Amino acid sequence: MKKHQLQDTICAPATAAGVAAIAIIRLSGNKATDIADGMFKPAGGQKELANFSSHKMIFGHIVREESLIDEVLLTRFVAPHSYTGEDMVEVSCHGSPYIQQQILNLMIELGARMAHPGEFTMRAFLNGRMDLSQAEAVADLISSNSEASRKMAMNQMRGHFSKRIMELRQKILEFSALIELELDFSEEDVEFANRDDLLDLLNETEAEINALRDSFSMGNVLKLGVPVAIIGKPNVGKSTLLNAILNEERAIVSEIPGTTRDAIEDTITIGGVAFRFIDTAGLRESEDTIEKVGIGRTYEKIQQASIILYIFDASQTSLDEIAETMKEFRERVGDENKRLILIANKIDLMEEIPHHFRSLVDLETIFVSAKRKENISMLTESLLKTVEQHPEESRDLLVTNSRHFEALTGAGKAIEAIRKGITDQIPGDLLSIDLRTALHHLGSITGEVTSDEILGEIFGRFCIGK
């Protein structure tokens, strides 16, 4: 976005497209009050909006010349006490798409232009109302689909994550300044920055950066929903189990093996955490071309999943068969970090549960009847254990953004280079290069270091009215 465009007054709907009882249209910029004055007549007869207090809602009419367009409520926000930090006006009108377009057309006729995606939030960032990390959290909050993702976005928007990053950056900045000072007195061979103290700082900073970076795997799945793959041989009840968990007939259930040819996905919130369940094609040797493609996709979904539910028919499957299947499965997947839960299904067909299953290798086994929905609550409780390792109060420092993860990774590598440089006793001018690199990566998270290209990429993902 060009700098002169930031001087424009912008407008856009802040509510979703379509028919609704109420819609909100935003107007922001230096001319916001004047443009609103040109189209709005307060019901009390007072004409100048400048005479009304900020943050006060006013009832009146939107008119074009003498033609009435709509009865509305108008709220004026005086800079800098607004979302964007500029003068703002919000018009709450009736939700007819035609009425909304008429009001937008009138705003444009009076000197505004349509906002670009995310331009309101970009102006809030550029005007110092929030840093870049907080601005990104706005988009996360809008798209949150569970209590966990909402809380994480809200904590980030309130600046908890930004504060920690700025504290880390300030520590490095102080030592960087001392190194730069040494360069100014290079001919006198003085050392302002004690190298042992710098190593202690690097160890402390690296540990915190690594902890934040490592939290991305959990933060990302909590934000998007924990992916859970349901796998097993054909006709063991995978689709029935998915329907029982979702409490709806989402997947086709049939006694014919190979009914599920492709992955079926759906999301449910359990205990405030979103889980994305994936019902996959049955694992077996098949000559059916379409079924073989489905089985191939099953293994792709397994690679993407954080939790794998391996379901088998408890009434017909032997211990040796399950043990052999698990061995083959682990060799093929090769990721020990994935949580694997065995689901012994069809207990309704058994007179009693065999005790030998309970000592099955070292894997958790849950006995269910997906058809009768028995013990499904035991399964959902087990799934929640996945997120218990991160207590709710610590989730404000979980990294959920891939851009932040990349920046933390870059900062970590720079700190490793600084440590090696100190050990090798390299000159201060070379140390300062790596220190600046670490500062750059941490600063890019909060927007202290940024570029127009990065801003365009970030805010281009927003909706137009935000």
Image (cartoon, rainbow, N blue to C red):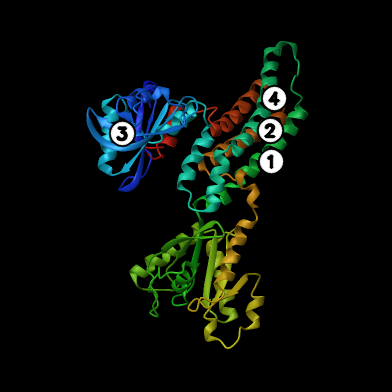
Q: Which residue is mark 1?
A: 207
The residue depicted at 61 percent of the width and 38 percent of the height is 160
Looking at the image, residue 38 lies above or below residue 356: above
> Which amino acid, mark 3?
His
Rendering quarter of residue 121:
top left
First in sequence: mark 3 or mark 1? Answer: 3
Using the numbered discs, state the Cα–Cα distance from disc 3 to disc 1 in whole angstroms: 59 Å
First in sequence: mark 4 or mark 3? Answer: 3
Task: Provide the secondary structure element on which disc 3 rests.
Answer: strand
Mark in front: 3 vs 1 = 3
* Residue 238 horizontal side relative to residue 398, left or right: left
Q: Which residue is mark 4?
A: 175
Crowd around label 2: few <14 · some 14–19 · many ≥20 (10 Å): some
The quadrant of the image that shows the C terminus is top left
Q: Which residue is mark 2?
A: 420
Looking at the image, residue 448 lies above or below residue 256: above
Query: How many numbered marks appear?
Result: 4
Using the numbered discs, state the Cα–Cα distance from disc 4 to disc 3 in whole angstroms: 60 Å
First in sequence: mark 2 or mark 4? Answer: 4
Using the numbered discs, state the Cα–Cα distance from disc 1 to disc 4 in whole angstroms: 18 Å
Q: Which residue is mark 3?
A: 61
Mark in front: 2 vs 4 = 4
